[in-house]
Image: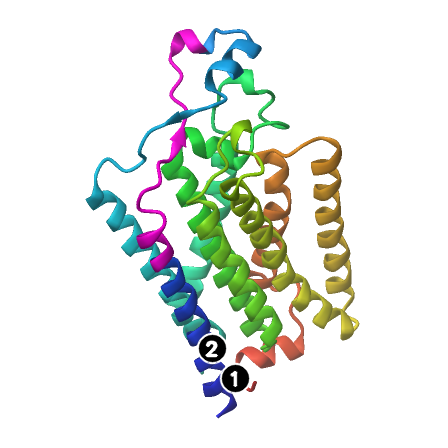
């Protein structure tokens, strides 16, 4: 009964998120124009100050060539958000050992997510904006590659969410706080990719603040869902998990230090993602962290909340 109650809570949460997102896209975003950069070859040869002066205001042109493309994106992205409740049901509350289909689905989107964010982070960009390793952010890349930016957000959200659930279920962990914070974090990135920051002239505007806020929510709440589980395992005095927890938190602190002292960039933004992907892969799809209790939990016929 308690399992059914929690399933209803999570279903209601994701239903509310999907409806709110769909209404926001339909009512407030349908008029939006996506700012993006289309420099030509001559522009690429401009001195840095001239290039920035020319493109700082960006070129405001529609991302969507017609209404059909826009509404297809709205319908597809809203439908995906509704599916997150199904992922909770099929992965976290699966009554039996993981099926081959579930395991394959999770490992494939984990690998796809890691591969895509890595590839995306090293895409070419006008050198006048600085060093790609220290100056070019994922959102700045999105101004040049808007659909890749959307796919970056979708794959990052989907891979972290499903594999965090897989990690919980594999270890017979059903912490409500972990599921909720991971849900909120992975939902927020759908806002980020629809309202990218767009140049220095839009700093401290509602658009830019919304972009920054939701990006930070994704980063910290997505990490929180993993950390909550790691702390749970640390309480069991599992040495491997204690070391993993220290390393993961250290990487997050290093990222914060780099953001403060070096600046934001796609490379720096990817650091915790790479570590999270590696950690989730090792926990979920290898026996490195397994122990007798974890092995036993996977074989249980039903989830006890």
Q: In the rendered structure, are the residues bearing label 2 and label 1 in contact, judged by CB atoms less than 8 Å apart?
A: no
Question: Secondary structure beneath disc 1?
Answer: loop
Quarter-wise, where is residue 224 in the image? bottom right
- Residue at the spot 60% in from the left edge and 33% down from the top edge: 265
Q: Is residue 171 left or right of residue 249?
A: left
Q: Give the quadrant of the C terminus.
A: bottom right
Whole-percent x and y of residue 281? 56, 56
Q: Nearer the viewer, residue 21 or 250?
A: 21
Q: Which residue is tagged 1? A: 303
Residue 77 image position (x, y, % from top left): 34, 54
Residue 162 drawn at (x, y percent): 48, 63
Q: How far across and down, in percent of the image, does residue 205 sit?
A: 53, 39
| Residue neighbourhood size for the residue with mark 1, other residues' Cα within 10 Å, grouped as few (<14), some (14–19), many (≥20) | some
Q: How crowded is mark 2: few (under 14 residues within 10 Å), some or many (20 or more)?
A: some
Magenta-drawn segment:
23-43
Q: Does the magenta stretch include residue 26?
A: yes
Residue at the (31%, 46%) spot, across then down: 30
Between the C-alphas of marks 2 and 1, the distance is 10 Å
Q: Mark 2 points at which residue?
A: 97
Image position of 254 (left or right of 272): right
């Amino acid at each position: 009964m308690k399992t059914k109650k929690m399933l209803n809570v999570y279903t209601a949460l994701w239903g509310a998120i999907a409806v709110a997102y769909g209404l926001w896209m339909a009512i407030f975003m349908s008029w939006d124009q996506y700012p993006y950069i289309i420099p030509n070859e001559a522009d690429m040869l401009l001195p840095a100050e001239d290039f920035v002066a020319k493109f700082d205001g960006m070129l405001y042109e529609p991302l969507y060539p017609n209404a059909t493309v826009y509404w297809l994106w709205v319908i597809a992205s809203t439908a995906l958000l509704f599916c997150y409740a199904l992922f909770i049901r099929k992965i976290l509350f699966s009554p039996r050992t993981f099926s081959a289909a579930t395991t394959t689905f999770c490992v494939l989107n984990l690998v796809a997510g890691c591969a895509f964010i890595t590839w995306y982070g090293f895409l070419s960009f006008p050198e006048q904006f600085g060093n790609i390793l220290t100056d070019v952010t994922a959102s700045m890349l999105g101004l040049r590659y808007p659909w890749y930016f959307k796919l970056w957000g979708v794959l990052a959200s989907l891979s972290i969410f499903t594999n965090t659930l897989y990690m919980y279920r594999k270890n017979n962990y059903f912490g409500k706080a972990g599921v909720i914070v991971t849900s909120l974090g992975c939902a927020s990135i759908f806002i980020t990719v629809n309202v990218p920051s767009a140049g220095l002239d839009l700093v401290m505007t509602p658009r830019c603040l919304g972009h920054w806020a939701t990006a930070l929510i994704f980063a910290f709440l997505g990490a929180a869902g993993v950390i909550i589980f790691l702390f749970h395992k640390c309480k069991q005095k599992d040495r491997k998990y204690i070391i993993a927890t220290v390393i993961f938190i250290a990487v997050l602190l290093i990222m914060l230090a780099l953001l403060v002292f070096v600046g934001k960039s796609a490379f720096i933004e990817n650091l915790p993602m790479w570590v999270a992907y590696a950690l989730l892969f090792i926990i979920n799809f290898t026996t490195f962290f397994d122990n007798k209790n974890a092995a036993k939990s996977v074989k249980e016929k039903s989830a006890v909340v």
